[in-house]
Amino acid sequence: MSRKLKILASSALAIPGMSANVLAAGPAESEASYRYTFYQEDASDVARDDSNTSNPRYNIQVHQFHVLHPIDQHLAVNAEVSYEYMAGASAAASYIEAGEDEVSTHYSGASKEKRFDATTSARYYFSEADVGAGAYLSKERDYFALSSNVDGSMQFNNQMTTVSGGISAGYDWLNPNSGVKNSKGETIDIGDLTAAEKATVSPGRLAGYKQNKWQVSVFEGIGQIIDMNTVVQAAVSFTYKNGYLSDPYRDICDYAENVPCDIRPSSRAAGTLALGGRKYFPQYDAYVHADYRLYLDTWDVASHTLDFDVYKTFAPDIKFLTDNNITFQVAPGIRYYQQKSAYFYEVPNLGDFPGGKAYDVNTTEYYSSDPRLSWYGALGLKTRLKITYKQFALVGLVERYAGNPAYGFNFSDNPAIGEVPGLPAYWRFTTGLDFKF
């Protein structure tokens, strides 16, 4: 098989849900890489912020380190660690004030969080198959998660057809004590508070204290090399979650009396269908990636994701560049996302409830004003740059993303449906260095 065809086939791994290698050939070199990402959300809209000011939204800084090392021609190990620092305010609740016709959103006070993630895996390569296993952990001050996975693939038809599949399982422990303080103003675990001090803690955080959740996922995929310039793939996956799935931090609101502001079902089943293709155009020396994903779940959320990227490599005929084998790759792309809201998403009109209390201990239905469960669309524009020099590669990414109900074709005269304050809009910048040895 030609080198160009192998590159084209390997690029198909970007299709969501496909994690196994297209070609059962272990890596020939060790790789190490570092990435730094800066993520900045736009400040809240003064017109929709119930504080009548503009709250700073989240900014996140991420450091990622990755190492891949082949033990021999059949076995390779992989490790990745990341550290995140997050600061800012997030949307806590949305509502319509009595007598008003516009949606307002209350934002939590600015907070600071740190997270540490670690992943390790190993993969064994046969002549026309491979199998891998991995483990993952994530640690925050108020959250701890563990998961593991097993996957593999087999090649048929002279390595022109690849069938892959895998299973993963995870377990999460919740301890939403961020911002919890005792009567002396000391940060403390909820379990160490006195009864009088617990009475000052929001119902959402009390409800989520020492809760847990688990999930299991399976996927199956197939990839087909059509010719030297074309690869197509399809994958299906199923995920089941069970446990405490509510958001304990969406609890800063005045319209819920002694109950959390966010109560969701304790189980969620979801299925996805992913389709994708890779096409090489020799006359332009460019690759085109196109992907589509359909998502459906038991919360009535249905979403569509479209990705389109173009990869173009340049090797200018300049002596210094050619002597040092320096090449440039530019990859602009666009992503469109649209989803239908969960069946329990709602923005309460407080004028419809006596005393302005939408929920109390007698409320038996599920409810949430989380904008991520609303009907909306989102558009993302991105550009990648990769500069290769011998064994080194300098990479960069700039992305602009914005969510808006109008992008999801959600037009309505009902402000509780047609407006979704709290949807993020952000800039993301990534830079990094790869090294092969």
Image: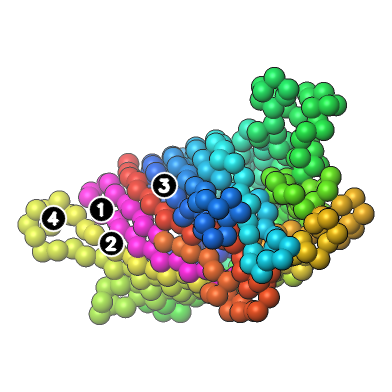
Looking at numbered disc 4 in the image, what kind of residue is underneath it? Leu
Marker disc for residue 321: 4
Question: Depth-wise, is mark 2 or mark 3 nearer the camera?
Answer: 3
In the rendered structure, which disc, 2 or 4, sits on the residue that comes first in sequence?
A: 4
Residues at marks 1 and 2 touching, judged by CB atoms closer than 8 Å: yes
In this view, the residue in front, 412 or 79, is 412
Residue marked by disc 1: 388
- Disc 4 crowd rating (10 Å Cα; few below 14, some 14-19, many 20+) is few
Left or right: 259 as drawn, with respect to 165: right
Looking at numbered disc 3 in the image, what kind of residue is underneath it? Phe
- Furthest toward the left, the residue is 319
In this view, the residue in front, 94 or 131, is 94
In this view, the residue in front, 311 or 242, is 242
> What segment carries the magenta color?
376-399
Quarter placement of the N terminus:
bottom left
Q: CA distance from mark 1 to mark 3?
A: 23 Å
In this view, the residue in front, 31 or 186, is 186
Marker disc for residue 329: 2
